[in-house]
Image (cartoon, helix red, strand yellow):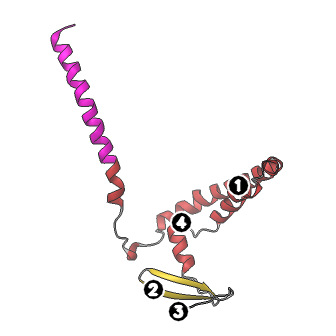
Amino acid sequence: MTVKATNKRAVKQKLFPVFTSLALMATSMQPTFAAIEIDETDFGPSYETMVVDTIVGKPLQLVNAVAGTAAYIVSLPFSLIGGNADQAQQKLFVEPWDAMGRCLGCTVAEDNYYKSQVIDNNTVRIVVDQPSEILINTNDYVVVTP
């Protein structure tokens, strides 16, 4: 082996950790760039997301919900023996069917926002400091003490 080849190898061995650390630093900084303010005029599903959700998303969610229901029924005896039937029901049955109820083309955050805007006569909404708020269901027994 020549001296030149040995020097190249030594340089590669020294530069590899430097480039690896730079790459790790760059990937770890991505979440900080993601924390930007949401433009409320663009909030909500777009035409494209609604079309894709209609053609691809909802049929796949339906298949997932039916498969989850079948898996829950098959796993029920085993989950009863294991004592985790409630967890199996939540993950395999409830969550897939709840996902079917999400608004068309919406993300989970958008769906939660739209559902929070629905008027409920049994709920009192107290805005504390934008965007914080307190929701009190008037069907519950509420005691406020000074």
Task: List the residue tagged with mark 4.
Answer: 108
Asked if marks 1 and 2 touch (Cβ < 8 Å), the reply is no
Residue at x 35%, y 63% (from the top left corner): 35
Asked if marks 4 and 1 touch (Cβ < 8 Å), the reply is no
Residue at x 25%, y 24% (from the top left corner): 13
Q: Position of residue 15 (x, y in %)?
A: 23, 30
Badge 3 density bin: few <14, some 14–19, many ≥20, Cα 10 Å: few
Q: Position of residue 92 (x, y in %)?
A: 70, 55
Q: Earlier in the sequence, mark 1 or mark 2?
A: 1
Task: List the residue tagged with mark 2.
Answer: 128
Q: Earlier in the sequence, mark 3 or mark 4?
A: 4
Mark 3–mark 1 distance (CA, rounded to whole Å): 45 Å
Q: Earlier in the sequence, mark 3 or mark 1?
A: 1
Q: Which residue is situated farthest in the front direction here?
A: 146
**Quadrant for the N terminus in the image:** top left
Is residue 117 visible in this depiction of the protein?
yes
Mark 4–mark 1 distance (CA, rounded to whole Å): 18 Å
Q: Nearer the viewer, residue 66 or 84?
A: 84
Mark 1–mark 2 distance (CA, rounded to whole Å): 38 Å
Mark 2 or mark 3: which is in front? Answer: 3
Mark 2–mark 3 distance (CA, rounded to whole Å): 17 Å
Q: Which mark is residue 92?
A: 1
Q: From which residue to which does the magenta span run?
A: 1-27
The amino acid on which the numbered mark 2 sits, given as a three-letter code, is: Val
Task: List the residue tagged with mark 3.
Answer: 146
Residue 128 found in image quarter: bottom left
